[in-house]
Image (cartoon, rainbow, N blue to C red):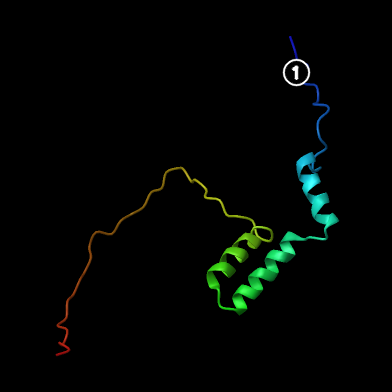
Amino acid sequence: MAGRKKGTPKTGGRVKGSLNKGNQSIMDKLASINCDPIEGMAKIAKKAMEEGELSLALMAYKELAQYVAPKRKSIEVSGELEIDVVQDILVSFKDIPSLD
């Protein structure tokens, strides 16, 4: 039987929260050329807004928003719901004067 025994804790692997090699490499390269993509995108969004290029500004701000606000996910609600429905509805119609 391979693997660990039932009930024993997991060991090894990457430390929680640490970057993988690919992400760390990209971040190191960006830092070496003094490039902050978030700051650059914010500058583009602001300039696009000032110049009236609203579609470009929207795309840039939409991309930036995911770093400051979590994306909402739909939720599923299940169960039973009892509702009393009133069936008597009173409708009245009035003559509307013509605009001619």
Q: Position of residue 24 (x, y in %)?
A: 80, 45
Residue at (59% x, 78% y) in the render: 51
Instruction: Name the image quarter holding residue 64.
Output: bottom right
As rendered, which of 72 and 90 lies closer to the eye? 72
How many discs mark residues in the rendered view?
A: 1
Q: Position of residue 14 (x, y in %)?
A: 81, 35
80 to the left or right of 5 = left
Which residue, given by chain and number where applicable, does mark 1 sit on?
Answer: 6
Residue at (48% x, 46% y) in the render: 77
- Residue 14 vs 7, above or below: the answer is below
Other residues around mark 1 within 10 Å, as few (<14) / some (14–19) / many (≥20): few
Q: Position of residue 97 (x, y in %)?
A: 16, 87
Residue at (78% x, 17% y) in the render: 4
Which residue ends up furthest to the front in the rendered image?
Answer: 33
Residue at (62% x, 60% y) in the render: 63
As rendered, which of 10 and 91 lies closer to the eye? 10
Which residue ends up furthest to the right in the rendered image?
Answer: 32
What amino acid is labelled 1 in the image?
A: Lys
Which residue ends up furthest to the top in the rendered image?
Answer: 1
At mark 1, the secondary structure is: loop
Which corner quadrant holds the C terminus? bottom left
Which corner quadrant holds the N terminus? top right
As rendered, which of 16 and 97 lies closer to the eye? 16
